[in-house]
Image (cartoon, rainbow, N blue to C red):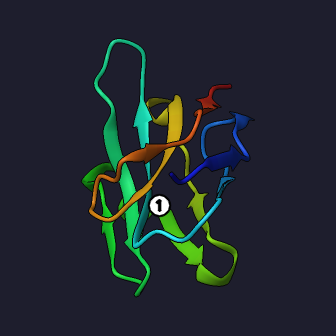
Amino acid sequence: QVQLVESGGGLVQPGGSLRLSCAASSSAAFMGWYRQAPGKERELVAAITSGGNTNYANSVKGRFIISRDNAKNTVYLEMNSLKPEDTAVYYCNAGWNWRGAYWGQGTQVTVSS
């Protein structure tokens, strides 16, 4: 069992930046972020392997950067040039494939003026 604790969500104006963090209770080969907006399905934002390979949704390429600190079992999501359509609950995900078995509780990100 891997427990995930997220932090860093909040309210930001369009064009602004936020950084999300997710600390895991133990190591996992894959860690990443998904998001779910009201009335929509949960979708991949970005994921990263322990070796540093990354996978991004097309909608966030060039704006978001995922990284991880393996020594701290922590994954980060740097979100830049935020748009209103980025508004969602962001969930940390971890496991042994690109959509892992473990989820965090979610953190709200709201992009609004």
* Residue 13 makes an appearance in the image: yes
- Callout 1 environment at 10 Å: few (<14), some (14 to 19), or many (20+)? few
Residue toward you, 45 or 70:
70
Of all residues, the one furthest to the top in this rendering is 39
Of all residues, the one furthest to the front in this rendering is 1
Please tell me whether residue 105 is drawn above or below residue 33 in the rendered image.
above
Residue 20: give x, y in percent of width and height: 65, 53
Mark 1 = which residue? Answer: 63
Q: Residue at x 34, y 53 (%)?
A: 100
Q: Residue at x 69, y 39 (%)?
A: 9
- The amino acid marked with disc number 1 is Arg
Q: How many numbered circles are shown?
A: 1
* Residue 60 makes an appearance in the image: no
Residue toward you, 84 or 50:
50
Of all residues, the one furthest to the bottom in this rendering is 51
- On the picture, is 55 further left or further right than 74? left
Q: Residue at x 60, y 49 (%)?
A: 3
- On the picture, is 58 further left or further right than 5? left
Answer with the quarter of the image where residue 110 lies: top right
Answer with the quarter of the image where residue 10 lies: top right
Residue 65: give x, y in percent of width and height: 50, 67
Residue 97: give x, y in percent of width and height: 27, 63
Q: Residue at x 73, y 46 (%)?
A: 7
- On the picture, is 9 further left or further right than 45? right
Q: Quarter holding the C terminus?
A: top right
Residue 14: give x, y in percent of width and height: 61, 38
SS type, badge 1? loop
